[in-house]
Amino acid sequence: MHFQINIILFALIAVPQISQSYPDFIPYSKLFDQSYLEDVVYLATYKSQNTTHLSIHENCSQYVVQDERYINCSGAGVDHIPDLPKASFVVDLSGNKIEKIPENQFIRLYKLYYLDLSDNPLVYIDLNAFSGLSNLSKLYIRRSKLYKLDIYKVDKMLSCLPMLTVFAITLQENISLGLHYCLCPERISVKENAPLRFLTSVLNLEIDSSHFKGILSSTSDKWKTKYLKIIVTGYCFYKLFHKTCFRNVQYLQNLSISFSYPKLKVILPLSFSIVSFSNNTFDNNKYMESLKIQSTSKLSDFRWFIDDFELSDHLRNITVTVSQLKMFKYRSVQGVNYGSDPKFSLKEALSPLLMSKSKIESLDISNNGLIGRESEMFFPPRFLKIITAHHNCLSYLFVTQYLHLAWYLQVFDARKQNYCLGKGQMNMYSRKNLPMKMGSIESVLDRLIYTHSVYRVDLYELNFLRKIKYLDLSWNSNKLNTKVLRREFLEGLPNLEYFDLTGYTIEFLEENATFHKKLKYLNMTSNALWKMGCKISERFKFLPSLIDLRLSDNKISCLSKDAFVGLKAVQIIDLSKNDIENFEFSLKHLQNIRLLNLSNNNIRVLTKSTMDDLDAIPAVAVDLNLNKLTCNCESRSFLKWLQNERKRFVGLDRYMCGFNNNSFVYLTSLKQITDDLDRSCSSHSFLIAACSLLLAFVTFTILGGLVYRYRWKLRYIYYMSKIQIKGRERGEDYEQLFDFDAFISYASDDFEVARVDAIEYLEQKKSFRLCIHEREFQPGESIAYNISKGIHSSKRTLLFFSKSFLQSEWCKYELNIARIESMYTKRSLILVIMLEGIPTGEMTIEMMDFVKTYTYLEYPKNGQQEDRDVFWGKCADFINGS
């Protein structure tokens, strides 16, 4: 079983914040995890593109993922529980003005998984307020004013939340007690009260110290809680924790005790004491992994008001308590001193640990202003693997000397060694008393971080760290003691994978200085590599495993065509904030690259070869923001390519380009810009050709429109001419009698009415001669010719309209030829017969014209003989008419 003990005394408000003006870097643990980076980018992009405002309040927003709604009303100014969407999955109502929550406020939200009500002035919550939240897993009610809500009411309130695994209920800091912290009894007697069945079943529990006292007074047997955090806000302060406090929390893995002292401008005497533990406090907690003691104030500022305040004694008490646990591996003590005691050294901080002979593996001594005295060099415990020492006063020289003795240490994190005020005795450059190097035992250090500190760094003091993989020496104020990176440095660290040398004055890299087979991350941002000129291109060719190369802010202006030719595994190249104007190096060999950052340079255009190289690597993203892109005749092809490849360019809408008249424009309307350039850059002959083509296009469009508009007239004239020509060939005169009395136009689905009945009534009974296409059309001729000839040779034309008629192209053709024949001969030629009702919206324009202009007949629908005789009689009268 992996076991950790984490003890933290942390004074948040006493730590000054260092300006974060330098670049952000990918966490080491996620450095080469491509899926992690893609997930982060996807989530940020998804939220930015899919976040909408809710109608319940103007300051509330939501985004939806797979029908689950994420509601954010944090700091929205609401004073009651709003009407939330039924599909709400995550709801954040923290930082508002809600004072009361009546019953059944969330009754419809059966999908709700997460609810945050922290930082509201809550004074009342109904015991049935959370009814209906059958799937709620996480509930936070931090920093409320529920001073009158006892622990048994809280337990009943949780009875309707069967899936709850995380619950936090704490109170706001209470200064109304006259700045006097009540001391809890050192012996807590168990009262015969009802058990807390629901509260003690929560796996992750965060409660106020007053609630903790109530829990201890209950008859609850075994807790299921694994993570317990106790917040002291003014009602109850425990000076001594002992076995009785945690005897029923047998599954406890992580315990955190946090003191929220009042934030006062003037330090006043308070009645409290440093928390301590009896030797058998955790005898029943065999699963214990983490113990954290935190404070929001600087404890050393209260040292004159605390009885027998001795930092070493306090550390010794904690160390002895946890050292009795067999699996003890991790201890952390933060924020106890903050430099208030200039005699508090690293050795004194570690002395309790050394005296306990514990097998501790990890130690955190951050935020204490600890000094490292050369006269107090000592051998750390053999089992110690990790030391974290942020915000102290450990010089780089002291660290390297100490590492000579810490043979078994694997990780040393000593960033931000700036808290050295009043420690004039420290000489940051002295090299006296360097300990003897023990060549028989090789250091196994895997990671060293020494960043953002005031001490000068010497790279070549680290050649004994043969197994180190992670080395971060970025942003140290006094830079390096050399301006040349020599070949032997990386040769002496054969297993190095991560190397960060940001913020120094490196001016020159020796030949093969960056030759390394295993290096995956190299950051040399903010150096002076510009002084190498074009030779810088030759220094990064022998890094076959390199994934991430960062050369930002080096004023580099020259890169040869074969720069980075050996980086076959590289995925990220950062050349931002340089002076590159002509970007011409080949990208053909960089087939794995995913990000090329060229922002903030002097690039005007990308060459044709560079564009071709990028086309061959579709997965690469490029950043050209803050360059001097040009909008002129020479850059037209580049801008058009930019338009076609816009998805690969990071933040394209923020790019700017300049015209020859010194004006600038954002590339938000790139297509319009390229169109304008096309017009302005074309020659006179090109303009004439373009105008000619445009004129031809317009002419053909007009002719095409005229032909389409008069298409039926043109067809009629064509076939009439053809009929006349054939008639002359047979010796027939143009003025001839009609061959047929009527032309019958119908769809095949209307065969029974249009043909059978017409033949029966009009031919057999009335002796008319009808032109029916199946019978009269001449074989071998085109259908269009036969139709035109049939209509022209017929005295009348009967059109049987139906829905099937509308679907037939030849029926429509017959309709239009008959219409043109009627117009040219000025004869009353057409009779429309409606076989069925047709909605006007389905009719063609020609059919609508006939229906609205001419009287039509409706075919009798009842089928009675008398009606049919009348109908066909009217048809016969029309045919006989003049």
Image (cartoon, rainbow, N blue to C red):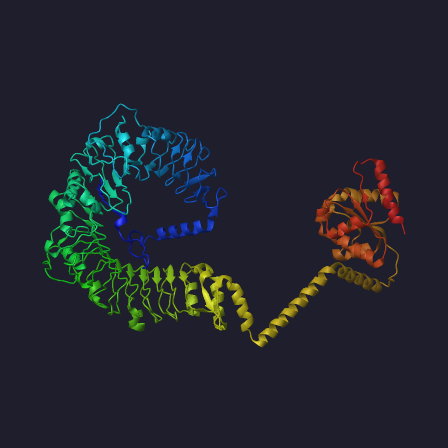
Instruction: Please provide percent x and percent y for residue 220.
Output: 28, 27
Asked whether residue 804 is in view, the answer is yes
419 or 718: which is nearer to us? 419
Can residue 382 be seen by looking at this rendering? no
- Tell me which residue sits at (16%, 63%) in the image: 429
Could you tell me residue 765's position as x and y percent?
Answer: 88, 42
Q: Is residue 480 above or below residue 258?
A: below
Residue 371 % position (x, y): 16, 54
Image quadrant assignment for residue 618: bottom left
- The answer to whether residue 316 is left or right of residue 509 is left
Please state if 302 lies on the left or on the right of 130 as rendered: left
Question: In this rendering, is residue 152 above or below 801?
Answer: above
Question: At x 38% / y 60%, what residue is drawn?
Answer: 595
Q: Say which quadrant the N terminus sits in.
A: top left
402 and 236: which is toward the camera: 236
Of residues 672 and 792, the one nearer the viewer is 672
Q: Position of residue 790 (x, y in %)?
A: 81, 54
Front one among 879 and 390: 390
Q: Which residue is most to the bottom?
A: 684
